[in-house]
Amino acid sequence: MGAKKFAVSIDELLVKKLDKAVKNGIVKSRSNALKEALSEYLIKLETEAIKRECLKLNSKEERGMANEFSEDENSWPQY
């Protein structure tokens, strides 16, 4: 997928720190650093959303359903 440019306003102190990291060779460029940081942040958000959904699951109900399936499976004839 191609890259798309957009404007972002960032606190001056963050820009100075970012420029220092570029100058010291810690990151390749401002753009690269922001792409990596944003990608990691979005992955973190997705992971947290999945965790929240998992917490909504009723473990007793899920175990009951699993046990019920297991019992049904054992009653089927072997082929």
Image (tube, rainbow, N blue to C red):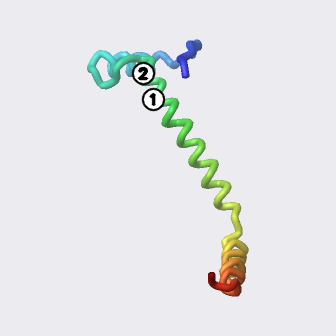
**Tag 1: Cα neighbours inside 10 Å, few (<14), some, or many (≥20)?**
few
Q: Quadrant of residue 30?
A: top left
Q: What mark, if any, has residue 15 been given in the picture? A: none
Instruction: Give amino acid for label 2.
Output: Asn
User: Outermost residue, front direction?
Assistant: 79
Taking the spot 72% from the left edge, 80% from the top edge, the residue there is 68
Disc 1 and disc 2 in contact, CB within 8 angstroms: yes
Q: Is residue 66 above or below residue 11?
A: below
Q: Secondary structure at mark 2?
A: helix
Taking the spot 55% from the left edge, 22% from the top edge, the residue there is 1
Residue 35 relative to residue 6: left or right: left
Q: Is residue 24 above or below residue 73?
A: above
- Where does the image place residue 72, in percent across and percent down from the top left? 72, 82
Q: Secondary structure at mark 1?
A: helix
Q: Nearer the viewer, residue 15 or 77?
A: 77
- Where does the image place residue 38, in percent across and percent down from the top left? 52, 30
Q: Nearer the viewer, residue 68 or 36?
A: 68
Instruction: Give amino acid for label 1.
Output: Glu
Q: Is residue 12 above or below residue 60?
A: above
In space, the residues marked 1 and 2 are separated at their CA atoms by: 6 Å
Taking the spot 48% from the left edge, 25% from the top edge, the residue there is 35
Q: Which residue is mark 2?
A: 32
Q: Quadrant of residue 60?
A: bottom right
Task: Name the quarter where the C terminus is drawn.
Answer: bottom right
- Where does the image place residue 42, in percent across and percent down from the top left? 56, 36
Q: Nearer the viewer, residue 15 or 73?
A: 73
Taking the spot 38% from the left edge, 21% from the top edge, the residue there is 17
Residue 26 relative to residue 39: left or right: left
**Tag 2: Cα neighbours inside 10 Å, few (<14), some, or many (≥20)?**
few
Q: Which residue is mark 1?
A: 36
